[in-house]
Structures are given as C-alpha cells and as structure tokens.
Amino acid sequence: MLVAEEKCALRWSNALDVLVLLLWSAALLFLLNGQQYRYFLRPALGVGLAAALLTCLVFCVAIVKVRHDRGAGRLVAFARAAVLILPLLYAMVAGHSVLDSHAFATRWVGPASKADSAGKGLQASAVSAMPDEGDDDELVEVYRSSQARKIPPALRRALGLPPDVPENGEGGKKKGVLTATLFDLAEYGDRYKGRRVTTEGMVAWDKENKDRFYLFRFVIVCCVADAQPAAVLVECPETERPAQNAWVRAEGLADIIRVAGRAGVIIRNASLTPIPAPKDPYLY
Amino acid sequence: MHTLLNVKSLVRNSHDATDGPRKGPTSGILIDGLFLAAALSALVLWAGTPVFGTMAVTFVAIVLEALPFMMIGSVAGGLIEVFISNERMSGIFPKGRKGVLLAAGLGLLFPVCECAIVPIIRRLLAKGVPPGAAVAYLLAGPIVNPIVFLSTGVAYSLDWSTAVLRLAFGYLIGVSVGLLVGSVFGADPRRIVLHEGSVQSRSIASCSCPHDHGHVEQFPCGPSATRADRIWDALEHGAGDFLDTVRFLIIGAFVAALINAALPRHLLAGVAGSPVLSIGSAMVLAVGLNLCSDADAFIAASTRSFWPLPAQMAFMLLGPMLDIKLLFMYRSLFRGRFIAFMAIVIPIAVMLTALGFHVVARGARG
C-alpha cells in the first residue's frame, strides 16, 4: 500500500514538473512571438529566452526519461508548482503595461550635470547650466547620423518584414528641426541648446508648475528593473497640458534650465502632437 | 582504501540525509504558502493601480531576465554532478587558502552571473568543495569575470580603471569572506548547507540507474551507463536543481519588485552628504534593486551626479553578492544561521572596502 502511494506521489511530482515546464515553454513561445518580451526586456535578450524555451523542453524530456523520485509529497509538489506558475499569471495581468508616470516619479532624481560631478572619471551627462562654447553644427550632425544600422529594403522584403517606417511620423525630417530621442537630449543637451528640436515620449506632470510637464522615456540596459528615465521639461500653457501617460511629440526650442540645483533641458514654445504608443516602449 | 573510505563517507552522508531531521519541505511549504497568499492577495486587491502595474512588470522582468542564466547554471551543475567525480573535484579545489584564492578568480575562466552561480555552488558543495572556496567563488564569480569587466568599462565611458578596481575589490572581498568562512565553518560543507538531502550527490543515495553504486568515484552514474544516459541524467539533475532554485528566485523577485516600485530614488540621493551615508544608501539601493551584475554598472554610472565613486563602487560590489533575490536563493542552499552570517559579513566587507577606497582616493587627490 505504502509502495503504491510512493509510486503515485512520484508520478504526480514528475507530471507536475513537466506541466510547469510546458506552461513556461508556452509562455516563452508567446513572448517570443511578435517580440512581446520587449515589454519586459531589451530585444537582444530574446536569444536568451529562445534558449530558455529550448532548455525547458529538453528538461521535460529528461524528467520523463529518467523519472527520478524527488521524495517530495503531493502538497510540497503542488505548492512549488503554484509558485512557479505565479509569474505567468502576473505576466498575463501585466499584459502590455509599460512603466508610466508613477514609475517616473519614483525613479526620477533629476538630470545629471557636470557641475555636480567630482573626481576622476566622473564626467556625467553633458547637460550643463553654462553655455557650451565648443558646440558646433558638425558634431551635432555626426552624432545624429550615428544611429542604429537599419535593415536594407531588399533584405527586409526577402525576410517578409514590414517596410521601414521613417522616425519622423510626418514622413521625413523637417528642414531646420533636429529629431532627437529623449536620451539624446538628456545626455547631450548642450549640443541642442538654442536649436529647434522634435522628440517623442510619455507625459508626467510637474507637480510644482502647471505650465510645464516632463516628457520622458525609460532607458533599459537589461530589463525593466534597471530602467532609468530620460526626461526633458516641456513648456506649454496649462490649458494645453496633455493627460498623464499620454504619448506626444513635442517640437520647440531647446534650452537649458536649472531645477533643484541640477541642469536639464527644457523645450520652450512647444507645439504638441498626440501620437500612438510606439512599438518599442523603451529606449535601449 | 582511500576510495573505499570515500564511499563509506558518502554512504554515511546519504544516510544522514535520509535518516536525519529534514526541515526543508515543511518550512518550504510555509514559505510557499505565505508567498502565494501575499502574491494572490496583491493581484486581487491592487490590480489596476499604478504601483501594482510597475511592480508586476518589474517582477516578471526580473524572472525572465534571470531564467536563461539560471538554466545555464543548472545544466552546468548537472554536468558537474554526473561527469566530475568527488576525487577530481578535490583536485580542482585544493583545501585551505590556496583553494580560496583560486576559487575567487575562477570567474575569469567560467564567467557566470549571480543567478547562474547558485545552482553551480549547490553541486560544488555536494561534491565536497570546502565552504571557504565555494563562498569565494559564489561572491567573486559574478564580479571577477570578463563580461562584467567589459560592461563596467563601457558603462564608465571606457574608463577601464573603474572596471579594474571593481574586479580587484570583488576578488579581495571574495577571498576575505571565503577565508573567514573557512576559519569559522571549517572544511565540511555539511556545516553550512540547509540539509544534506537538498544538495546530496544522488549517485549513491537515490540514483535510479540500475547499477552498482560501489564504483561511484569512477563512474558517478554507474559503469554500465552509456554517455547518452549520463547526459540525460545530468539534464535531469539540472532540471531538478532549476525547479528547486527558481522557486526562491520567484519569491525574491517579487519582494525586489515591490521595493523597486515603491522606493523613491530621490530619498537615497538626498542622504548622500557624507561618505558613510552615500555608501550606505548605495548599498541599500543595491540590495533593493536586484540588478544583474552585467547591467548594474550602467545604473551605477547614472548616479554619478549625486554619489561619489566609492558609493558607486559599493553599489556594484554588493549587488552581485547580496540582494533580496539572492537572499531567497541562498535559502534553497544554506542554513539560516549561515545566511545570517553572510548577511552581516558581506555588507561589512563592502562598507570597509568602499570607505578604504574613499580614504585612499581622497589622499591621492590631496
């Protein structure tokens, strides 16, 4: 009788392990399909998830093949299985959620500035309250041209990928207006000072001043846990201030402003255009 | 004779593991139950709130990011279990200081992050590697490795001196804590592991292969097993280790995500007035954020405006050694009192290192 029960427990624990691994495999397949995992990780880590999917399946085969008795009772096996599938439940609930103005308020400590940095090797972001006399058009253009390499149209057609969409949603670059990501503006703000710029991001209200708001995007190194906001202030009348968490394109004159002792970029006289949430919610 | 003694020792160990008190499963159910109750309550009560949204996304992201690396570590642990005999392992990890010095630098040859290293350490301890050497590899491995060196250098705008310092300090702390563990807990892994059954080599105790286990030293999975059988056995070991350890990763990631979503960063930046406060706040953030050692340098570099370099260094040293997620993962492996020991000793070692660095750097600047 006891032996029969042990055998039953063995089958249960093995079957549960396999079931959990299969559920994880299905979830990983779902996340990889259409690169849904980009809501959590940077795109390059998709390779790791693909490897994890393969390993899950191999683990399933190994468990079924070896059928080792782990000696765990049913309750232990069920409790463990429930813990293991909990992230899948949370992933389903989280859906396509992205870090929003709440996360911005928690993680934002203000822009880094040269004036606050000290010591060897501590050159921070290039935003400074002082005018940058070394600023030159050529450097800006070189910087702007050093963007990520794009897939050639022929290869794109061969792979069945959709046609490349120009960065500027209006179909191209406007003359005299620099298109910049929020990361560009936050890190190299001095280079844009006095220039007309256009950039896109999410809205977070400035609690102290209703005539301006933060335009932000999160920059991810590996995953959402390390996401840091890159943000600029946008000046606009209170009546035209967009809703929290709305995606907008702001075009205006870039300037440097000091907030709480730290220098950052502000876009003055901004014209705002609502835009749909981008396919890539984060910057990488 | 020596082999016979080893076999007898292993048999005794396996009996200890099966006959002795096993607190693991009961406490495991309690932890699992409490965690599930909390997590499901949060899901029901707070779903849809901004804090919950941030927490849920962060929780899933931490688990997804760690998953592939934990699998690599688990498979490596399984291969160690099946293909490396205890005798050979003793040769790789000599006892005493030499073993600790070697283990702390092992990450240069076998680079692994802090998530992948836990299942490996689990198997190393099961193979009789002394606690001092195992802890030295556990702490220094995720820092003293070429991938982390490169990521640190890139994060600091190719200022390689920061990367070199991080590796040197990581090695120093790994060796120091490893030697301390060796002197306090001796050379017997059973003094620090949670219960022998959790990490005991299955070669004798419960391997399901139909063979004579008396030859375990030469053939961990039996002399008659084919290479394919042994590979499947290694993968099954890996699957078991993965499923045992990932449970703690999930619990740790949940707590970490809660802290990550609720902790206002500007509060930590605000207490950065003195060296002790800035280093202390950096250490709190390192424990709370639970970042991968490959990525944390980028976050440390982004704090340059309010933290001096010693505080950034403390952030980069402590995170890969001790954070919320790792504390829970250590629970899958170590006894509670040993985890408490580590939770005290590691922050002290990091604080002393960072303060020493601060004093030296200030002296150098005149």
Image (cartoon, rainbow, N blue to C red):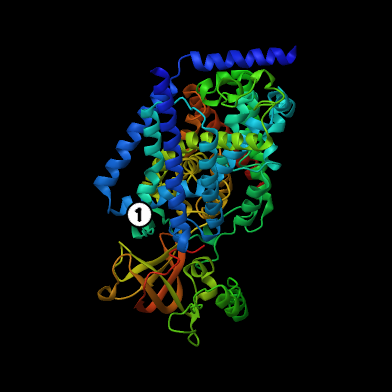
Q: Is residue B187 above or below residue A171?
A: above
The amino acid type of the residue labelled 1 equals Ala
**Can you see residue B225?**
yes
**Relative to residue B266, is residue B1 drawn left or right?**
right
The spot of residue B317 in percent (x, y) is 58, 41
**Relative to residue B98, is residue B240 drawn left or right?**
left
The spot of residue B56 in percent (x, y) is 36, 50
Residue located 68% across and 41% down the image: B110
What secondary structure is marked by label 1?
helix
The spot of residue B274 in percent (x, y) is 50, 43
The answer to which quarter of the image holds residue A19 is top left
Residue located 48% across and 22% down the image: B337
Residue located 38% across and 69% down the image: A277
The answer to which of B301 and B251 lies nearer the viewer is B251
Total labels: the figure holds 1
The answer to which of A14 and B305 lies nearer the viewer is A14
Q: Which residue is mark 1?
A: A94
The spot of residue A279 in percent (x, y) is 43, 68
Crowd tier of the residue under label 1, counting other residues whose Cα lies within 10 Å: few below 14, some 14–19, many 20 or above: many
**Can you see residue B118?**
no
Q: Is residue A268 above or below residue A208?
A: below
* Quadrant placement of the N terminus of chain B: top right
